[in-house]
Amino acid sequence: MKVEQLFACHNVSEENKVPLATLSFQGNAMYWWTTLERERHLHKDPPIEYWNDLRGALRRRHISSYYNRELMDKLQRLQQKTMSVKEYRQKMELYMMRASIRESESNTIARFLSGLNLEIRDRVELLPYQDLNDLVQLCIKVEQQNLRKTSSRKEGSYPNSYPRRDFKREESTPKEKPKETPKSVGKDMLTPPIRTRDVKCFKCFGRGHVQTQCPNQRTLFLRGVDEYSSCDDAPSGKEEEENNERVYPYEGELMMIRRTLNNQISVNLETQRENIFHTRCKVFENICSLIVDSGSCCNCYNARMVEKLHLQVVPHPKPYKLQWINEDGELTVD
């Protein structure tokens, strides 16, 4: 384009266009031109003397065969998106000139409207226009209006959170002196007294007293197998107290088979049904220590205890296996 303008400005003849154009070749372009002349001379082809032949050779050298197809594809998919209206029109005209597209003005207007953003196209379609230039001017005005609206919304949605202070007024107003606290007030006066209702008992979970002063002193009595009672649950009356027989533990030499409790941490549970009870029993004139554990699901006896007490061993009608008794694994009860 620029070379043709220079030719037209200086009225260069057709015979002088090729030598004048090749005179400005440098680097790879000069190497390509000398190689092309040598090959045409070897093949005995006529030299390039006219500008149209040189331009065709340059297009074949630097422009691919699918260049026009790519330009048409880009032109069909061209959208405004983030571009301004002016930039969008310039890009569309550049693609049309490179692809050598010649069409009516109505088709160009339809092509221009199809790529505009919806917020501009919906408003411009309702306005009258005569040609493409009028349409472009209307689109520019609508775009400027949209920009003003968005800028005003941003200013309204983000107000200045730091208001200006009138320093002159602040300096003129007298400052209030802080009130002096009397020195006679001590730490005991500042801390509030502890109320009795805030004190909590960790035995009965009541309020107003501590654990050592708890009035709920419960005592458990054994009545039989899996039965127990406490003095709180028992009904008041001399008749029922006389009928209930109190069972006390046996006293004598203790035959300990195995020490089961080794400094275990006691856990405060809500009910005493899950606690472990200690007492003593008498088996064949032998005093034994008895542990009632409601949480255990296995009824086990030590073999040493059976030997010491001379208990009779009877085979089990339905043998079964026990686990988690020791580290040896399963134990067969037969």
Image (cartoon, rainbow, N blue to C red):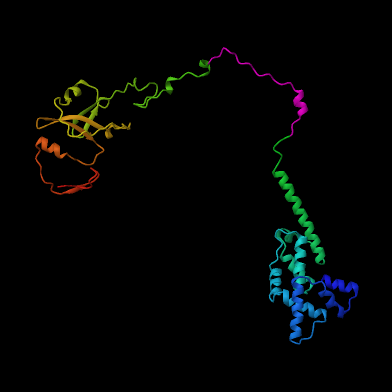
Residue 272 in view in this figure: yes
Q: Quadrant of the N terminus?
A: bottom right
Q: Please, is residue 137 above or below residue 315 in the view?
A: below
* Residue 165 is one of the magenta-drawn residues: yes
Identity of the residue drawn at 76% across and 60% down: 85
Q: Position of residue 251 (x, y in %)?
A: 15, 24
The quadrant in which residue 7 appears is: bottom right
Task: Give the magenta part as a residue range.
Answer: 164-186
Please determine whether, in this image, residue 118 is positioned above or below residue 264: below
Front position in the image: 49 or 208: 49
Give how far across and how far down residue 306 sits, in percent. 12, 38
The residue located at (42%, 20%) in the rendering is: 196
Q: Is 128 in front, or is 1?
A: 1
Q: Is residue 50 above or below residue 211?
A: below
Of residue 207 and residue 10, the one placed in the foreground of this image is: 10
Is 249 left or right of 11, judged from the image as shown?
left
Horizontal side, residue 158 vs residue 232: left or right: right
Residue drawn at (10%, 42%) of the image:
313
- Tell which residue pokes out farthest to the top in this image: 184
Q: Main secondary structure of the magenta part?
A: loop
| Location of residue 167 with respect to 77 vertically, above or below | above
Task: Give the tally of numbered discs.
Answer: 0
In magenta segment, residue 282: no
Query: Where is residue 163 shown, x and y percent of the image?
Result: 72, 35
